[in-house]
Image (cartoon, helix red, strand yellow):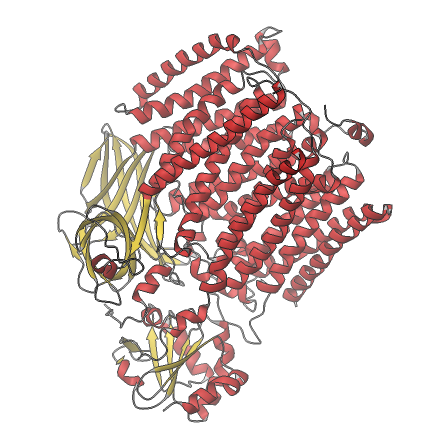
């Protein structure tokens, strides 16, 4: 009975989303006030319906109802309860349900929290969100129904969740990532609504800015979590693989990062508006493209066999309809937009434009690297893969000017900046950052390499200039203490966001240049020494988990003869799916990680073991966390909370 | 004139997108037909293998068991809900003297034996493919799947999904009757 | 030309310049980093589509099935070698120094990435086995399609 309730409320939500799309638009067209105001009601109802459906599925997982075939294939009674719940989004059908549920969550948030938005604009925005929801509901119901029953008979036990997904990181990674993906739909809806209305002004930028920032924040955390998960779960010690699925999440992030910067210009200065709209459309389009790539199996990826061409075709048709329609609308409507703000070539506007250019260049690099294998095969030249070196090299090249301009960018004034004024601060930053980065490498690095010097210089260049800029800004009119308290949220957000990037750059530099990776053959009782660390293989024991068996190797680690850690690296075999898994042992630290992963047992009884020393790898995830926190600070800005009379807003056209 | 040029410029993203979409659509439209992979095995002999009997670990079978008469090869598992559903129909076919070989796919031996003793065993021979290696050779996507094999041991048809009265009457029966 | 138009022209042209520079760099880097996929037979006889044989020292990917009984290990290190075969006559030896993936088994389809050492052997820096039981890279599936069973159960 319960699965039918879930199914029914899903269909109900689909119908409601259709009404949410059609009725308010009809109201806007005819001026029917009731129809215009109905948008909010439909949004709330649609949310309630899909929430019932989602909670039902989660509950069915919880009680092990294997009469539902999605649960039978993705869960097992031996699975701990928390993994049973996260198994809801462990495979295709459920993750799509999560997707529509989150879309409804964003929609209801827009409906309830944008009190100062004119009702007509709100009606348009919610109608666009309704359209997106409707498409995805159809997709779920027609091609991937999670509530499908297993005929009158059902199995005694389920096939179990893929062991790779039985992990804390993967409990929260997909929801975070999806919050980001789906969140860009709000920016998309605002953009399309503004295009429909034919009114693109700075008020538009102001409304969509906090939403975009929120989505970007989730996406940032989601990607960082994914990277962290890959690091400790895949047993390779890598943190980014340029895998198509990873790239699929990275592309919307790049577009989103460009978007939050260009939105700032559009809000404050009223320029770049048509460009900003295009970015808003692209960020969500790339999210959809990512979904398509992962779901359709057109790219060679781990999911290739599980995918289904009809699903791919469905998403693609939806993609063409939504993105194609939006871009066509853009071509027609954006031509009407006139940019009124004026600025000189040397100004903050230009530098933010430059930032956008670099981000888009990076986006194109990723897009090319991801899609070229597909095109190559298509035109009959055989299968290829594009290696990590390509992406690594391109990003090394791109990050240099990007970071240099980013550092001094915040010193530039809006409209016009006399370059002469900047000579002194830039020199100070240059000297300081050179000094700090060399000192840093002298303390933490065993030897100097050109790339390491360059990378840490770029990182500290950003850090020094951020700190220096805060100092300049706060001593501009007040004493330092007095001035620093007067800095607004968005200023702190910018500074912190940039610091986050700097931390990440330093982390990547150190990890890529000074990691030590040893694949060794080690028998119990033997040890291996490097970088003043001594790893002693103490013993090997059998392991018995709730739904797996395996072996665990115990290692004692000594640093300068001091015992600092005992590490247990596991090799598990999940009994239901008979899948071997490597659980690496990690001794985490602020300046270095020690990483041990068991390989295979060799014929003579010794083990192949990976032992890694990874300096500053935590900084790679610390950086994005700081960035996300910066986004949070920006959203909290009073500017986006004050409830003004909507009429004020309407008057606030192009500044 | 200026405005027209502007619209043309603004159309660039749209056009780029459409070109991209065409590239994405073609592999879906032409390449990914699942039946394409299946056809590779049709007309060929069953791959060579050595597998244990499900009830008796010491008893081993090889591809020769498929020669001598026409038969069905049914791939099943206890974790597979649809297998449960089609089991009744397999029993019915077995009662009509159709020779069926069962291949238990990536499964647990104990559970499988219990399944067969509780639900009745329609198989003349039950192979135990614990690691799924023969399944890999046969290109099995999952369970259930049913292969029609003629008396020379050559695969003549492959059915993916559950076997029921309708499928049998509409499609498989004719092929089965037509085989030697 | 008025200053406004001039400025716009400057911005547009710098935008175009930047993008084309990025494109150029990208294509250049791409050319050096494209790893073509070969089956063992294609290594020996040339690509099916073009007939081109890989050159010694070239980076490439190879996919095939690990020949049963061909895995040889060095007793003192992690060095290992094995032969890859496909459904044609190809047979290529892969040398690897490192830890083989969990799902590496004889008779299993794998993909290796490395450089061509000589006409019929490869120095691999990465060996990938299918990660998911149901997953086989489509290229490997094509290469071993219809092969008779070469596996023995241990």
What is the quadrant of the N terminus of chain A in the image?
Answer: bottom right
Could you tell whether A321 is left or right of B165 in the image? right
Which residue, as the protein is rendered here, is positioned at the far left? C75
**Image height check: is A184 above or below C51?**
above
Question: Which of these two is toward me, A624 or A599?
Answer: A624
Could you tell whether A465 is left or right of B102 in the image? right
Which residue, as the protein is rendered here, is positioned at the far bottom? B96
Q: Position of residue A552 (x, y in %)?
A: 30, 50
Q: Quadrant of residue A610?
A: top left
Q: Position of residue A644 (x, y in %)?
A: 79, 28
What is the quadrant of the C terminus of chain A in the image?
Answer: top right
Could you tell whether A376 is left or right of A320 in the image? left
Q: Quadrant of residue A396?
A: top left
Question: Which of these two is toward me, A94 or C149?
Answer: C149
Question: Which of these two is toward me, C84 or A74?
Answer: C84
Whether residue A614 is visible here, answered yes or no, is yes
Question: Which of these two is toward me, A426 or B118?
Answer: A426
At horizontal 35% and vertical 38% (from top left) the residue drawn is C29
Q: Position of residue A385 (x, y in %)?
A: 35, 49
Q: Position of residue C117 (x, y in %)?
A: 17, 49
Whether residue A178 is visible here, answered yes or no, is no
**Image height check: is C150 above or below A126?**
below
Total labels: the figure holds 0
Q: Quadrant of residue A137?
A: bottom right
**Image height check: is A339 above or below B47?**
above
Could you tell whether A381 is left or right of C74 in the image? right
At horizontal 39% and vertical 61% (from top left) the residue drawn is C135
């Amino acid at each position: 009975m319960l699965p039918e309730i879930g199914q029914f409320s899903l269909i109900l939500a689909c119908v409601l989303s259709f009404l949410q799309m059609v009725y308010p638009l009809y109201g806007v067209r005819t001026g029917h006030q009731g129809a215009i105001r109905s948008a909010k009601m439909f949004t709330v109802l649609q949310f309630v319906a899909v929430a019932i459906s989602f909670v039902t599925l989660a509950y069915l997982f919880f009680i092990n109802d294997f009469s539902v075939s999605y649960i039978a294939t993705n869960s097992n009674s031996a699975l701990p309860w928390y993994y049973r719940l996260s198994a809801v989004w462990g495979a295709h059908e459920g993750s799509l349900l999560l997707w529509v549920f989150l879309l409804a969550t964003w929609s209801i948030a827009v409906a309830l929290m944008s009190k100062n938005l004119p009702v007509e604009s709100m009606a348009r925005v919610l109608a666009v969100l309704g359209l997106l929801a409707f498409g995805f509901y159809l997709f779920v119901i027609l091609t991937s129904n999670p509530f499908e029953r297993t005929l009158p008979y059902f199995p005694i036990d389920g096939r179990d969740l893929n062991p790779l997904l039985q992990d804390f990181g993967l409990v929260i990674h997909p929801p975070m990532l999806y919050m980001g993906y789906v969140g860009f739909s709000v920016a998309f809806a605002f953009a399309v609504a503004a295009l429909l209305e034919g009114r693109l002004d700075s008020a538009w930028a102001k409304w969509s800015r906090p939403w975009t920032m929120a989505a970007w924040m989730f996406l940032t955390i989601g990607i960082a979590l994914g990277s962290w998960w890959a690091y400790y779960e895949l047993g390779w010690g890598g943190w980014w693989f340029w895998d198509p699925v990873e790239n699929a999440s990275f592309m919307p992030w790049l577009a989103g990062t460009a978007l939050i910067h260009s939105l700032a210009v559009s809000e404050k200065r009223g320029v770049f508006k048509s460009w900003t709209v295009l970015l808003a459309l692209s960020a969500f389009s790339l999210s959809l493209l990512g979904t398509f790539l992962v779901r359709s199996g057109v790219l060679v990826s781990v999911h290739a066999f599980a995918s289904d061409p009809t699903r791919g075709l469905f998403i693609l048709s939806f993609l063409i309809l939504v993105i194609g329609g939006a871009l066509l609308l853009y071509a027609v409507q954006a031509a009407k937009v006139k940019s009124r703000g004026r600025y000189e070539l040397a100004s903050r506007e230009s530098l933010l434009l430059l930032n956008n250019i670099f981000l888009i260049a990076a986006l194109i690099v990723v897009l090319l690297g991801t899609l070229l294998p597909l095109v190559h095969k298509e035109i009959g030249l055989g299968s290829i893969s594009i290696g990590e070196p390509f992406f690594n090299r391109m990003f090394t090249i791109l990050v240099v000017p990007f970071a240099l301009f980013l550092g001094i960018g915040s010193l530039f004034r809006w409209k016009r900046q006399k370059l002469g004024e900047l000579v002194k601060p830039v020199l100070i930053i240059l000297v300081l950052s050179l000094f700090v980065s060399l000192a840093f490498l002298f303390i933490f690095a065993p030897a100097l390499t050109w790339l390491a010097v360059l990378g840490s210089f770029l990182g500290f260049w950003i850090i020094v200039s951020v700190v220096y800029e805060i100092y300049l800004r706060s001593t501009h009119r007040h004493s330092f203490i007095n001035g620093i308290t007067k800095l607004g949220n968005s200023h702190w957000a910018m500074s912190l966001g940039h610091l986050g990037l700097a931390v990440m750059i330093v982390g990547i530099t150190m990890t890529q240049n000074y990691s030590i990776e040893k694949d060794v053959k080690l028998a119990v009782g033997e040890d291996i020494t490097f970088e003043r660390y001594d790893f002693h293989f103490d013993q090997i024991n059998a392991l018995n988990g709730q739904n797996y068996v395996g072996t665990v190797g115990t290692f004692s680690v000594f640093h300068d003869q001091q015992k600092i850690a005992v590490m247990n690296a596991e090799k598990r075999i999940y009994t239901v799916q008979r899948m071997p898994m490597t659980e690496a042992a990690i001794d985490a630290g602020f300046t270095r990680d020690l990483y041990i992963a068991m390989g295979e047992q060799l014929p003579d009884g010794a083990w192949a073991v990976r032992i890694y020393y990874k300096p500053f790898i935590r900084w790679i995830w610390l950086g994005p966390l700081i960035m996300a926190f910066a986004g949070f600070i920006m959203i909290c800005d009073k500017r986006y909370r004050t409830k003004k009379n909507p009429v004020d807003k309407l008057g606030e056209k192009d500044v | 004139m200026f405005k027209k040029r502007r619209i043309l410029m603004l159309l660039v993203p749209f056009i780029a997108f459409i070109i991209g979409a065409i590239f994405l659509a073609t592999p879906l439209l032409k390449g990914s037909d699942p039946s394409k992979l299946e056809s590779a095995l049709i007309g060929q002999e069953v791959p060579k293998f050595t597998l244990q009997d499900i009830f008796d670990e010491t008893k081993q079978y090889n591809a020769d068991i498929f020669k001598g008469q026409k038969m069905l090869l049914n791939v099943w598992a206890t974790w597979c809900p649809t297998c449960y559903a089609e089991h009744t129909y397999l029993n019915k076919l077995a009662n009509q003297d159709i020779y069926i070989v069962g291949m238990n796919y990536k499964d647990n031996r104990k559970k499988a034996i219990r399944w067969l003793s509780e639900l009745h065993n329609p198989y003349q021979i039950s192979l135990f493919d614990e690691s799924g290696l023969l399944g890999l050779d046969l290109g099995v996507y999952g369970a259930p799947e049913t292969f029609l094999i003629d008396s020379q041991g050559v695969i003549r048809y492959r059915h993916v999904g559950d076997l029921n009265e309708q499928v049998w009457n509409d499609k498989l029966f004719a092929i089965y009757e037509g085989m030697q | 030309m008025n200053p406004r138009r001039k400025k716009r022209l400057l911005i547009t042209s710098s935008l175009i310049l930047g993008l084309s520079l990025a494109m150029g760099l990208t294509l250049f880097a791409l050319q050096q980093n494209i790893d073509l996929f070969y089956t063992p037979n294609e290594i020996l006889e040339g690509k099916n589509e073009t007939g081109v044989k890989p050159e010694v020292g070239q980076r490439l990917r190879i996919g095939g099935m690990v020949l049963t009984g061909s895995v040889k290990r060095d007793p003192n290190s992690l060095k290992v070698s094995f032969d890859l075969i496909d459904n044609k006559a190809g047979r290529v030896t892969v040398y690897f120094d490192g830890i083989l993936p969990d799902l590496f088994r004889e008779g299993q389809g794998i993909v290796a990435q490395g450089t061509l050492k000589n006409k019929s052997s490869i120095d691999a820096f990465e060996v990938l086995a299918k990660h998911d039981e149901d997953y086989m890279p489509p290229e490997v599936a094509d290469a071993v399609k219809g092969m008779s069973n070469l596996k023995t159960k241990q």
